[in-house]
Each structure stands twice: as structure tokens, then as C-alpha cells.
Image (spheres, grey):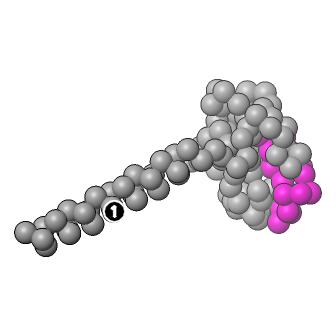
Amino acid sequence: MARTSIRTKLAAVAATGMLALGTGVLAASPAAASDQDFYGCHSGNACIWGAGAALNTGPTHQYRQAGTYNLSGQENYHYVKNNQTDGWKFKLCTGWNGTGTCYTMYQDDLWWVNLTPINSVVVTP
């Protein structure tokens, strides 16, 4: 009987710990919210930094208007930030004019990504 009681208590403590941990994770706010500028990437924009560049150098490309934009000369790894608001998405596409395989970045996403196979980007609500 005592054995069951100890197991029950241990299970209760473990469940409480997991619940507390889960609550802490859910309550945490994003480190780089889109309602603020992010290393020169203005709130409401999607941004691309130079190849291999550190974030503190500022973005080389910023996109604010909905549309499709072809890329040129963007090779190797870059930081890409979707700092748009209102749930807008930024898509990286392998084909020209938003075609091919597209990878969707959601609001507040920051990626370190190889842009060599990416030929266009799409800004969309």
C-alpha cells in the first residue's frame, strides 16, 4: 500500500513539473516580435541580409508590398527574416515568378538559409 502511495506522489510531482514547464514555454514571448525593427529590418517588412553577413550589418533587401520578386545574385547562406505583421507570409521559391517549390516563412520567422536554389520571393497576406 505504501508503495502505491509513493508512486502516486511521484507521478503527481512529475505531472506538476511538466505542467509548469509547459506553461512557462507557452507564456514566453518571441525574442524578435514583428512589431519592432529587427537589426535594421523594419516592422512590416521581409528582409534578406548579404551572403554570410552578420545580422548587425543590416539587410540588403527589404520587401513591404504584396507581390512576387525575382532574385538575382543571391547565393550561399543568408539570414532571412519575416518581420511582417498581421500574419503575412514570405515565401522563398525555387522558380522564377513565384513558381517551383516554395518554402513559407511565417510572421517572426528568422532563417539561416542557402539562397542558391531560390530564384524568387513572394510577399503575401
Is 55 a magenta residue? yes
Mark 1 neighbour class, 10 Å CA radius: few under 14, some 14 to 19, many 20 or more = few
Please identify the quarter of the rendering in which residue 102 is found.
top right
Give the total number of marks visible in the rendering.
1
What span is colored magenta in the figure? Answer: 45-63
Please identify the quarter of the rendering in which residue 51 is found.
bottom right
Please identify the quarter of the rendering in which residue 87 is found.
top right
Residue 23, horizontal then vertical, whole percent: 48, 48
Describe residue 26's horizontal placement relative to residue 71 as left or right. Answer: left
Residue type at mark 1 is: Ala
Residue drawn 20% across the image and 69% down it: 6
Q: Can residue 101 be seen in this view?
A: yes
Residue drawn 33% across the image and 62% down it: 14
Whether 113 is drawn above or below 24: the answer is below
Residue drawn 55% across the image and 44% down it: 27
Q: Residue furthest front?
A: 2
Question: In which quadrant will I find the N terminus?
Answer: bottom left
Residue drawn 73% across the image and 38% down it: 34
Residue 73, horizontal then vertical, whole percent: 84, 55
Describe residue 49's horizontal placement relative to residue 7 as left or right. Answer: right
Q: Which residue lies furthest to the bottom in this view?
A: 3
Residue 86, horizontal then vertical, whole percent: 66, 27
Is 25 a magenta residue? no
Q: Is mark 1 on a helix, strand or loop?
A: helix
Camera-side residue of 110 and 67: 110
Q: Residue furthest left?
A: 1
Q: Which residue matches tag 1?
A: 14
Question: In which quadrant will I find the C terminus?
Answer: top right
Q: Is residue 102 visible?
A: no
